[in-house]
Amino acid sequence: MASTLDTPVARRLRLVKHIIIVCSGKGGVGKSSVSAQLALSLHASTPHARVGILDVDLTGPSIPRMLGVNGHGVHQSSDGWVPVYADGRDARLACMSVGFLLKKKDDSVVWRGPKKNAMIRQFLSDVRWGELDYLVIDTPPGTSDEHLSLLEHMAPVHERLSAVIVTTPQAVALMDAIKCLSFTRTVNLPVLGVVENMSGYVCPCCGEISNVFSTGGGQEMARQESIPFLGSLPVDTELVTLLDAAEPEEAPDAVESGEAGQRSFELLQRYQKTPSAALFKNIVDAVVRTLPRVEERLS
Ligand SMILES: Nc1ncnc2c1ncn2[C@@H]1O[C@H](COP(=O)(O)OP(=O)(O)OP(=O)(O)O)[C@@H](O)[C@H]1O
Ligand code: SF4
């Protein structure tokens, strides 16, 4: 009989070193953009790192658009689904999302818990992730069926899991972020730290960061809860232009998975020149430093 450690998910994720779950207590705080930037920055800043990004925000998948690979179809090989490589033939930035499976870009997913659970299991067990240094997982806001499914299916690789919590500085977002932190404690999921997003505003003319609203709430939450503070990211108009502008040029299935278009290649290059990319480098450095410490506690 197969041991509980020898499940299809455990076999598929055998060569994945670190799995980082990105969550937020509240919607719209920038969890998907932080997930996308985490994947892009790990890909760029760690020499030759192989990175995967899995979008399990099933009802609002935005990762394909943010990485410029919206409209790609997923290819089924004899060994499972081939992820879409946002960096083309380099094949070091693998992406999978329910967005690739929808017939039309505006189709919505209205699924009950069991169907979501089955989809997540399939993403983890049927995608050819191969060898990855980091698998970043973008989740829906709050703590939902999707989080429970992820943790259930990845129980055999629990010692490789950790979480990043994204919040904005406002009090209501922080209250929800604390609930999210409480969830991670209940399920014994180590937290790498907190990212405070939309903290101040980058002037598009001179690059100066102004504090339009309150800032520092995420840092204060991290201090009070004794978890690391990974850094803050201001509202960056260049980032919005980049991540929100990438509309599909082709109909779904028009582009084979494994082949990124010119759009995603340009996006990778342009992202590195934004103010956010420079700030995100410090966040990635903090994540890479903290990972071995939190994983040691669980192994
Ligand atoms: N630092 C930032 N500067 C400018 N725009 C940002 C920033 N962070 C996020 N955004 C923009 O805000 C919007 C919401 O961001 P995003 O989709 O990442 O949030 P989310 O928390 O994942 O939302 P949801 O709850 O719908 O999953 C997007 O248009 C995104 O491009
Ligand atoms: S920060 Fe400087 S350049 Fe930017 S809007 Fe203000 S005064 Fe103008």
Image: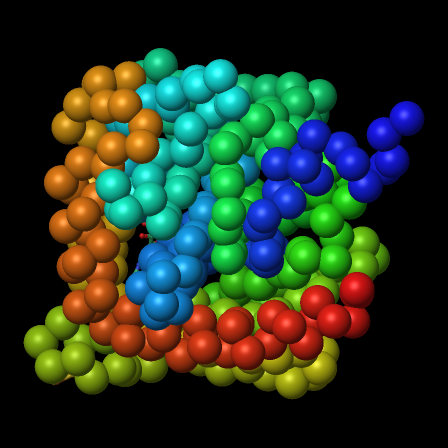
Q: Is residue 61 above or below residue 270?
A: above
Q: Is residue 259 above or below residue 91?
A: above
To which quarter of the image does residue 285 belong?
bottom left
Relative to 29, is 256 on the left or the right?
A: left
Relative to 155, is 112 on the left or the right?
A: left
Residue at the extreme left: 205
Query: Is residue 151 shown to the viewer in this render?
Result: no
Q: Is residue 160 above or below residue 230?
A: above
To which quarter of the image does residue 181 belong?
bottom right
Q: Is residue 246 above or below residue 134?
A: above
To which quarter of the image does residue 257 belong?
top left
Q: Residue at x 42, y 28 (%)?
A: 82
* Image x and y of residue 170, in percent: 50, 69
* Image x and y of residue 201, in percent: 28, 74
* Image x and y of residue 58, in percent: 52, 31
Task: Locate the N terminus by quadrant.
Answer: top right
